[in-house]
Image (cartoon, rainbow, N blue to C red):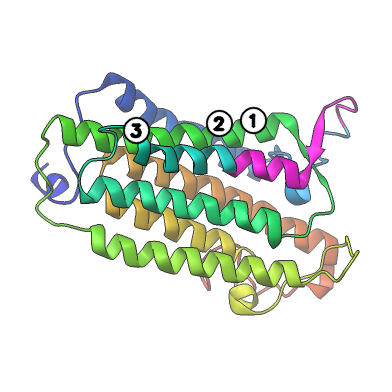
Amino acid sequence: MSIFSSFILSPPSSIFISCMSVINIVGLSFFGISELFGQHLGYSKFWNVSIKKKKNEFTLSSRTGMLILYAPAAVAAAASFFLPGAVVGLRAQLVSLALAIHFFKRVFEVLFIHKYSGRMQLLSTIIISSSYTINTINIIYTQHLSQSQSIREPAIDLKYPGILLSIIGILGNFYHHLLLANLRGKDEKGYKIPSGGLFGLVICPHYLFEIIVFFGLSLIAQTAYAFCFTAGTVVYLMGRSLATRRWYVSKFEDQFPREIKALVPFVF
């Protein structure tokens, strides 16, 4: 327990936060495992999987759906700076700032970078948007509780390594999103095998860098809640990346290089 407390702030006295920490890992892991068994959240390449089963299912344009995914979380993170007493102290300010930068970057990409061809299931949009927004609020709220309950800072301060990792993750994620966007010319809607950057090693380097973003955020926050959210996100993106690789193999068959992994170069 002393080793644990050296790295992580003691959990605040909150049954709600404790329950949500467990829900994070269980819920996100469930969706990650579901991806492996063909039960996909309906966006990107998998937007029409369940449409074939439910012809009347309501969908949104991909751009609208993606905006709904990220905008509420971005607004929630930014709003924390304007709520009196919500963000107190350097660590709390850095946590809110990191969340705001990450989600506003995603909003920027939706509006100006990505090129969409499909649609997005409304139910999947609600599930993912709710997860991002609720967890953004709870990460900030956990930081607030730790401050208001005067919980002692961990012996080892990891917020500055966390800042570095967050920057690396944001830049790497943005770069590989640019590469994906540039695969399509004007009015093109089909998929191609990505190339450039780490795409020669893994099919989802943008997921890898997103994990780095959230791991960096966890180091800045140094709360059990933030680490639980990151752990659940890792499991989900592992499942999604494996499903994505399987999709590319089935679509491009012999054209797809078999040495390309799903998420982690040379490993996974």
Q: Nearer the viewer, residue 26 or 138?
A: 138
Residue drawn at point x = 34 percent, y = 43 percent: 226
Residue type at the position of mark 3: Leu
Q: Nearer the viewer, residue 154 or 107?
A: 107
What is the spatial separation of the Cα atoms under label 1 and label 3, in whole angstroms?
Answer: 26 Å
Disc 3 crowd, CA 10 A, few/some/many (<14, 14-19, 20+): few
Q: Count how many numbered circles sit on residues in the image.
A: 3
In this rendering, position of residue 196 left or right of residue 189: left
Q: Which residue is mark 2?
A: 130
Q: Which residue is mark 1?
A: 126
Cβ atoms under marks 2 and 3 closer than 8 Å: no
Q: Residue 206: percent from the left, percent from the top?
A: 58, 63
Q: Which residue is mark 3?
A: 83
Disc 1 crowd, CA 10 A, few/some/many (<14, 14-19, 20+): few
Q: Residue 111: percent from the left, percent from the top?
A: 69, 54
In this rendering, position of residue 81 left or right of residue 112: left
Q: Secondary structure at mark 1?
A: helix
In this rendering, position of residue 152 left or right of residue 240: left
* Image height of 18 relative to 80, above or below: above
* Image height of 268 relative to 240, above or below: below
Residue drawn at point x = 13 percent, y = 48 percent: 154
Q: Earlier in the sequence, mark 2 or mark 3?
A: 3
Cβ atoms under marks 1 and 2 closer than 8 Å: yes
Residue type at the position of mark 1: Ile
From where the camera sits, is residue 159 visible? yes
Q: Which residues are magenta?
A: 53-70
Q: Which mark is residue 155?
A: none
What is the spatial separation of the Cα atoms under label 2 and label 3, in whole angstroms?
Answer: 21 Å
Q: Secondary structure at mark 2?
A: helix
Q: Earlier in the sequence, mark 1 or mark 3?
A: 3
Residue type at the position of mark 2: Ser
